[in-house]
Amino acid sequence: MQALPTASLAAANPGMPYVGGPEALLARFAWNVPPDGVDRSKPMKVFYADRYGGNAIHRNGGGARCASDGTWQIKGCGLNPLAGIDNDGSIGRPGTTTLAESLQEALWSEVFQHALPYGSTRICAVIRTGLHDEQAARPCDRVLGMVVREAAWRPAHFQRAHMFRPAPEVAASLPSDTERVRCAVAQLDRLLPVPIDCSPSEWLSWSPLARLNAGMNEMVRRFAEQFAAAVAKRLMHGTVTASNICLDGRWIDFATASALPGWANYVSCLCRLTDEYLTLTQTLATLCFYIGKYFPVPIEERRGLPQPNELVDTYVGHYKSSLDRRMAGLIGCQGVLAQRVWDTPDGRAAMRQLGQILLHLGTSGSSRRYASPILDSSTGTYDVLAILDIIANTSDPVADARLASLIPSKELRTQLLSAHAAVCAAMYSLADRSNLSLRALQRLVCLYRNKAALVEPLFYRDRMNIQLEEMAQDIHDPGQFNLEAERLWKYAGQRARLLYKDPDGFTCLLWCADEGELVYDALDDMIVACWSGQRKRFTWAEFFDADSLATDVTTCRRDMRAFWGEHLWEML
């Protein structure tokens, strides 16, 4: 690859600064494959193409516009030898990404990193290449960029690229795709995630076959947890395939990602929100096929290899169980609290019933392709957010009457209120055993419930795209663009932490900004302010009634109240 002297830093991840600063980052990653060929009289550097298979890479042999140095991967650096040719003999893809697309990837990487239990592949920087695509129809698409992201193993690395049609001039120099998969599968047991209840030393002492089976089960458990969390938080990847998810559960590639206003049957590129997990069942079956074909075990042990039907059943079972718990958590039973309720037989039964009822309510009605910038939260038969607001903040006899217009079926209302009461009883029975006062637990549950209904409009896909495209088109000064892009990147991360991050212990994040964060600690029934380098604790009365707070804390209190809504603080 050739050095890009026109490149500049469009944005660096505020949460993971690159050692050495912008100069070192550009020296390492500001390289590309020139569209008109490499000039060998100029400086060159060797990077590696990321070769993989699967069913969503068209005629390519892997990441056709990516290059890796083993630790980090550059996306949008021009076409590499893995670019396949079309039926007419041409390569119909440019191998680049626009600056707006690159920044969109960065923002969604940060959102999913905070929102999902196993996060995403992190992006450390977005580079403005200084190159332009003058053939692009829209001005915002003419400004090109590149993403620098973590390299990661994906299921696609262990699958054939059957449709790959390399250009004739590179076909003879490429190793056999069959041999590539054979070598990759032979290493799979060392690359799979380690189960959470297994120590590293114990893991290394196991046989390759034992590691393979345990690692595959841990992988599908993580896949299931990721999808269940995303559905409950109304987040959609949009195109999860064998090459868009990592072996350790992280998500990657976010061109179709979006937040949604509800749980209705919004349809993305491949499927509905609540069916997105099913897109991986074929991936798992295909992976088992290649394991059966290439994993090196004695013939008498081959019956012990992962079986596709069993692995898919394990995955689906984990998903449904996790989704029941996550959906039931929408009433305010989250984090450690949810786990402790789930660990009791009666609590688990109640959460399963409530989760399934809420999912049924959310997904009833016709499917609809989601389209921004206006997303209708009432799409579907039932408005689940309105239903949750009623059952969480109204006594049961009154709740039934208020629900009648939203849920006409008396039987369904009775089932919902009964399951809700059972989960609440299980939650509040834990107060004494968890060293929580009943009032503190009620506050915590109320905070969790109200947070589940909040949304950040920036995270609606088309709204984000419009804003980023306008930035790329209108801000020509690289320095000004850098400031605005990093501000937006930081804002996305802060909002994702505030809205989606699973709580630690019996706490709830109330607000976060550049200066610090505010956290409710239910064990002490106090608000903890980690602000401007100081840590202070306040009672509710002190925090909301006192006028003696520092000016910056008073400002954040005002912003926090506006974000959550004044009605919440009146209830608390």
Image (cartoon, rainbow, N blue to C red):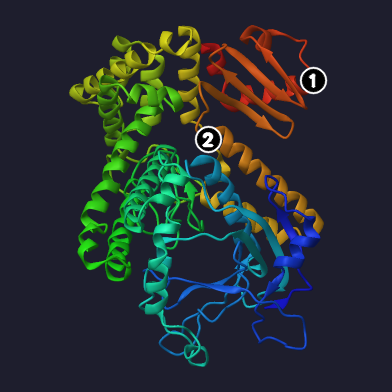
Closer to the camera, 428 or 97?
428
Across and down, in percent, residue 83 comes to 50, 79
Asked if labels 1 and 2 touch by Cβ distance under 8 angstroms, the answer is no
Label 2 belongs to which residue? 501
Closer to the camera, 417 or 172?
172
Q: From what the image shows, is residue 527 above or below residue 264?
A: above
What amino acid is found at the position of numbered circle 1 in the picture?
Answer: Thr
What amino acid is found at the position of numbered circle 2 in the picture?
Answer: Lys
Q: Find the distance from the CA under tag 2 to the CA under tag 1.
A: 28 Å
Q: Is residue 88 left or right of residue 10?
A: left
Label 1 belongs to which residue? 551
State whether residue 360 appears in this view. yes
Across and down, in percent, residue 224 comes to 36, 45
Q: Secondary structure at mark 2?
A: loop
What residue lies at 72% left-to-right and 87% top-to-bottom? 39
Q: Quadrant of the N terminus?
A: bottom right
Q: Quadrant of residue 319?
A: top left
What residue lies at 42% left-to-right and 75% top-to-bottom? 180
Q: Is residue 26 left or right of residue 398?
A: right
Which tag, 2 or 1, sits closer to the chain's start? Answer: 2
Q: From what the image shows, is residue 18 above or below residue 379?
A: below
